Amino acid sequence: MATPLNFYIVDVFSNEQVRNSGNQLAVFDCSQNPIADSEMQAIAGEINFSETTFIMPHTAGEGPVPVRIFTPRSELAFAGHPTLGTSYVAKNILHLSGKESVQLALKAGTFQIEVDSQGLFWVQQLSPTFGEALDAKLVAKSLSIPESYIDHRFPIQETSTGLSHIIVPLNSLEAIKSAHIERETYYKLISRMQAKSILVFTPETYLTESDFNVRVFIEYYGLPEDAATGSGAGCLGAYLSKHNFEQTTRNNSIILEQGYEMGRPSQLFVQTDKKGNEIIVSVGGKVKLIAEGKWYVS
């Protein structure tokens, strides 16, 4: 007999100024009916969003809510927009937490998500780590762009705040719009690195309130591109803070726009703070429920 699972689809990092915005996430409530890892992976492949999450068995009010995160191809220890979207479901729909915060137990550790007075969900990410500068010629070829499109004032650098990304500074929206993955060179690049996704950014933006336009290419994980990437936003915030990029000196807070080339414009908020040699990064955004239903597992 088939087992029904409740699931919820939310838009994370939605931009209230633009229709059909944000990055869609499917959250499955397995708290009463746990399912096998293979079944979670199969569901994530069928849903085919950048990530799908599963809330595991948990008693309300008894410690962090255990959550698993799957891409269409594999499980992740941490990801940004799934963390915020799952927190919304756990807090506002399943009532597994208090009014202003929720703790999630992920494979990467326990994360506390706060909700501010504007309804933004915020998560402080792990302390950033940085790799060596990468070869601009190889990265440009991976992105199918001329090397002149890269802003050579700043390094191309692998950065992680829980999930690694290759951070690439570009000099214009034209460069952003031109980028697309050249598969052979891309797989050659990532074969020797922990990071499998490439984040490109520029200070030239579509919206006046945005500080940077961002694209994130994630072909390794089963999709060509991500509409909004919380882990990538955290990595970019850490990178900008480390390299004293001029736009971060204003108030240690930035607004990112992402997803325009996909037709799903998103808005991500990043705050950074330096304490000695440590960079503290938090990522926030709006979350809204757009659909719910039942999924039957045999």
Image (spheres, helix red, strand yellow):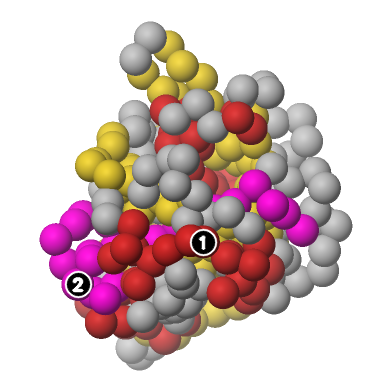
Compared with 210, 8 (above or below) is: below
Mark 1, other Cα within 10 Å: few <14 / some 14–19 / many ≥20: some
Q: Answer above or below: position of 243 versus 294.
A: above
In the rendered image, residue 17, in percent from the top left (x then y), is placed at 85, 57
Left or right: 16 with respect to 48?
A: right
Q: Position of residue 246 (x, y in %)?
A: 60, 30
Residue that badge 1 annotates: 149
Which residue is drawn at the image coordinates 82% and 69% (left, top)? 19
Q: Which of 196 and 82 lies nearest the eye of the viewer?
A: 196
Which quadrant: the C terminus?
A: bottom left
Indicate the amino acid at tag 2. Answer: Lys
Q: Within 10 angstroms of label 2, few (less than 14), some, or many (20 or more) residues?
A: few
In the depicted structure, whether residue 121 falls above or below residue 190: above
Picture quadrant of residue 143: bottom left
Q: Quadrant of the N terminus?
A: bottom left
Measure the alpha-carbon separation of dots 1 and 2: 21 Å
- As drawn, the label of residue 188 is 2
Q: Note whether residue 275 is visible.
A: yes
Q: Residue furthest right?
A: 17
Q: Amino acid at mark 1?
A: Tyr
Give the x, y percent position of residue 136: 34, 57
Query: What segment carries the magenta color?
Result: 185-206
On screen, residue 117 versus residue 187, left or right, reads right
Quick check: 177 above or below 156? below
Is residue 98 visible in the rendered image? The answer is no
Eye-nearest disc, 1 or 2: 1
Of 161 and 92, the residue lying toward us: 161
| Percent of width and height locating residue 191 | 16, 67
Q: Residue 172's image quarter?
A: bottom right
Q: Locate residue 290 relative to residue 272 in the image: left or right.
A: right
Sequence order check, earlier mark of 1 and 2: 1
